[in-house]
């Protein structure tokens, strides 16, 4: 049985080759956009620098004015004011 000879590049017909099948991915629908949406209907308060500084100093004084680690009082003041 004879095998057919493959055509040369000039004999090939353009457009006869099929495009490879594309992989389909599951489409996820996006949640609808709600204007002025605030998480859990609670507005997150952004305290000012002065408010944080006053409260951090108050915490520092209450701790006995220890030397070093002012970050502890600052971060505590920030979290307290944001929660309020």
Image (spheres, helix red, strand yellow):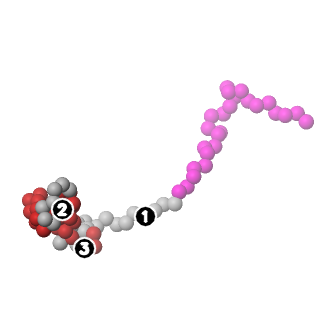
Q: Residue at x 80, y 30 (%)?
A: 5
Which region is colored magenta? 1-25
- Magenta-drawn stretch contains 12: yes
Residue 61, image x, y percentages: 11, 65
Residue under circle 3? 41
Front-lying residue, 42 or 1: 42
Q: Nearer the viewer, mark 3 or mark 2?
A: 2
Image height check: is 13 above or below 43? above
Chief secondary structure of the magenta portion:
loop
Where disc 2 sits, the SS reads helix
Circles 1 and 3: CB distance less than 8 Å? no
The 10 Å Cα crowd at callout 3, few under 14, some 14 to 19, many 20 or more, is few
The magenta stretch spans residue 23: yes
Q: Which residue is mark 2?
A: 73
Residue corresponding to mark 1: 29
Position of 2 with respect to 24 (left or right) is right
Residue at 15% in and 60% down: 66
Number of marks: 3
Q: Disc 3 to disc 2, how far (Cα)?
A: 29 Å
């Amino acid at each position: 049985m004879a095998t057919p000879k493959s055509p040369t590049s000039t004999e090939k017909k353009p457009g006869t080759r099929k495009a490879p099948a594309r992989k389909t991915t599951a489409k996820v629908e996006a949640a609808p956009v709600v204007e002025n949406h605030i998480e859990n209907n609670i507005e997150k308060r952004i305290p000012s620098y002065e408010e944080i500084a006053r409260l951090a100093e108050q915490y520092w004084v209450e701790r006995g004015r220890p030397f070093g680690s002012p970050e502890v009082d600052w971060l505590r003041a920030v979290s307290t004011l944001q929660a309020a």
